[in-house]
Amino acid sequence: MKRVRHIFYFLALALNYSCVIDNYDQPNAELYGTFIDEGTNQPLAQDIINGTVIEIIEHGWVENQTNVTQTLVSTGDGTYRNSQIFSGQYLVRAVRGNFHDIAPIDTMEIKGRTKLDFLVTPYLRIIEPSIERNGNLVTATFKIEQTSTQDVARIGLYVHPNPNVGNPMTLTSRVESTLNRTTDTQETFTLTIDLSNNTNTLLPGRPYYFRIGALSSAGSAKFNYGPAVRITI
Amino acid sequence: MKIQIYLSTAILAAFTIIASSCSDVLDLQPQDKLPVEAVFSSPAGVKLYMANLYYQLPTEDFLFFNAGFNQNQGGPNNGGQTRAQSTDEAVHSEAGGLNNGPNGDGQNMNNYWISGYSLVRDVNLLIDAIPTLNIPTEERDRLSGEASFVRAFAYFGIAIRYGGLPLIKESQEYLGDAESLKVQRSSEKETYDYILSELDVAITKLPESWNGERRATKWVALALKSRVALHAASLAKFWNKAPLTGDAVDLGYVGMSANDANGYYNQCIEASAEIMNSGVFSLYQPTPATPAEAAENYRRMFQDPNVALNEAIFIKGHTIPGDRRGHNYDIWFTPAQLANGWPHPGRMNPTLDLVDMYEDYTVPGQSAPIVTTTDGDIDNYNGFDANKTYLRFDNPSDPFLNKDARLHATVVLPGSSMKGTEIVIQAGYILPDGSPRIRTGGSVEINGKTYYNYGGPTPNDYSGFDGFGGNNTKTGFSFRKFLRESPVAPGWNQSTSDWIEFRYAEILLNYAEAVTESGLGDETEAAQAINDIRRRAGHTVAIPLTISNVMRERTVELAFENKRWWDLIRRRERHEVFEAQISHALLPILDLRINPVQYIFVRANVHNMNPRTFLIRDYYLSIPGVGASGVIQNPTG
């Protein structure tokens, strides 16, 4: 037994000798905040699957900084939070959203809990939205406010058991209308889902969220949405 | 005690010696590998090396599964998940909707960065060695033609996944300075131009034939050029349908200009025309007397391409069963009834959407959706509705009687025959009181006769809709194309049918598409091309050259040849088709309300399928290892 112990002593000695503590500190900073519509002062809803991306690049990491872009994704209600960030100086930019491009923040310090709200102008606003059920028909009426002269590509009415309902998350075949033109705030749009045509996926007695969406034709624009409305069918 | 001390001392001494000495005892030459000089010093060694390069080509063939290329080692248990199941051609019997989009990293079918550049390095080493080889000039030329072909094929496999690439045109040597090895990406256009120029080199240097050896000929290089040019042209024409932003776009590493489309279409037309005018190739059995004969010809060509050497331009062979040799299409995809003891058959379930697309001989020139009700509503996928009047059929195969021969040769339809067995695909029955029993299992006895919910008493007696083992189709259709007539050998890597990587019909379709999209080339010849293919499939009425006719023809003719995915990608249609997309099934149901009983059919969503959405950013995959390589990443997030 002693023999074996000796062997272990030597081994332990040999192993210990070569060990140097080389662990880095774990990420200890957090970045969080909300995308806010500067017109309405409300959080800007968006898709959860294909939502806005925040890119952060730590300064002084390597020469060619585009190589270490970290991306943070946002939630459906327009908020975001990432608590696994290393403290440091960062370039921060929100890209490919459902709002007009905003300038990147060239340098900001992320340390501890850092709050950063983005004030943005959505491509489109759904105004006076109404989603009502009459018998087998769920009808959405709304108007669209454009914040630029770019065409409205299409509009849609979406339904899903999850409140993050939207164009990539819907249970009916497309209830959409392709516009590819400009609109004015006087024009009323109507979209209808016939529940009797969807008895296979929309089950009676269950609650579903319905939501109006509109897509601008601006390059890489994402959908803008009205509020999700819960209806038990 | 003494012995222990001796031992301890000895160990301590050994430690000290090992730790301090610099012996070369470990610097052995590996016994199972040849040094590169030895390989290239003999023509036989070069041929061996060449075989390895061909093996690495990114051919999306019988070995291409969700885990990537060449999946035939050991028990490659990848679930039988193929590219077709990530498109609208088919669904997998177990998965709720495959959407193999985003991962450009890790072990999967999209990641071709690392293995692609491994092939580039291997071929660059060969190119370095070619001038030093002791062989006749003619042979040297052919060898460098082959090398250019392999290099173009490798870069094409990478470029279609990642966009503009770092172009490593000669082998790199590490001399202690990693920085000097870094190469930044070229623009997407430069990348395709480089691939096409490599193919031009290959076309001039390669022979027209290798006397029976399956190696790249001039024609194979032209066929690849036709495919590459069409891909580049489509990207140029349609890139703006799905625009992206980000550093890689600003720097031009991804992105094509519509102004360049016609140049690429023209290259596709010229390469295709050279093959078409050569007289070397033609369609296999171009004028069948009946649709049944057409179906049998088409089926035989894929079961054994060697009967159709006039159509097959490039074949990847599987001669011997076993690890790294055979493939697994027969065990994964044969209908459950013909599993022959294999526990996991029936994974490929062609969709109703694909079946609908095939023409009906009575209505040429358009898709022919299967009509199941008297009101003719084909957009209702809600399942059985007692208030609807369904069309009734004596046989479950009746709705498909006049459909395109290629449907019968590609898909196992309900009630059709395979290997002498009638394939039973039944989703349930309607009881005499009108209540539906769909996907329930069990049986019912009526007037002394027993009717089974799935059409048979045990799982060996049917191939559809039972969830048992994931072995049954859930779309109402099973798979036939490529599969052998002989019984399934119930083990891994036992199939030896050959794969056609390039065939004449694809060239004709490339030509027709390029002419239609660009207005260049000869429209009469292009119309002739698609109608020749249709004639071979038993059609006798010619249809006009329109883009929808060409694309429908392409989809049905090349179904399951792993072209559909790239067609959707290059034409930027994938994000449009895959927006919360659900595939559809056709449920054959026995109607017990009448006597004698008859079949009705119900169009329905595929059971338990998740909606699939393809994101625009996934047109370009994330490049692995950019932190070390300094390569600019594709748009993320």
Image: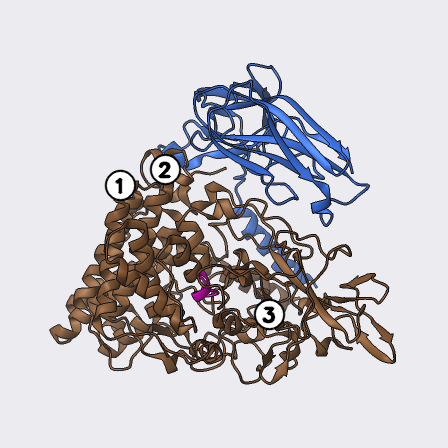
Chain colours: A blue, B brown
Instruction: Estimate the spatial distance between the alpha carbons at disc 2 and disc 3, rounded to whole Å.
Output: 43 Å
Assess whether residue B560 is covered by the magenta stretch.
Answer: yes
Q: Which SS type dominates the magenta stretch?
A: loop
Subunit that carries the residue with mark 2: B
Subunit that carries the residue with mark 3: B
Of B53 and B22, which appears nearest the observer?
B53
- Residue B386 higher or lower than B247, as above or below: below
For label 1, the crowd category at 10 Å Cα-Cα, with few meaning under 14, some 14 to 19 and many 20 or more, is few
Instruction: Give the residue type at disc 1.
Output: Asn
- Tell me which label, 1 or 2, sits earlier in the chain: 2
Helix or strand or loop: what does disc 3 sit on? strand
- Residue A86 higher or lower than B492, as above or below: above
Residue B478, disc: 3
Instruction: Give the residue type at disc 3.
Output: Ser
Instruction: Give the residue type at disc 2.
Output: Ala
Q: Which residues are magenta?
A: B555-562
Percent position (x, y) of residue B86?
Answer: 53, 56
For label 3, the crowd category at 10 Å Cα-Cα, with few meaning under 14, some 14 to 19 and many 20 or more, is many
Judge left or right: residue A199 versus residue B269: right
Q: Which residue is mark 1?
A: B259
Residue B151 appears in view = no
Instruction: Estimate the spatial distance between the alpha carbons at disc 1 and disc 2, rounded to whole Å.
Output: 20 Å
Subunit that carries the residue with mark 1: B
Q: Which residue is mark 2?
A: B248
Q: Quadrant of residue B557?
A: bottom left
Q: Closer to the observer: label 1 or label 2?
A: 1
Residue at the image position 55 percent from the left and 44 percent from the top: B579
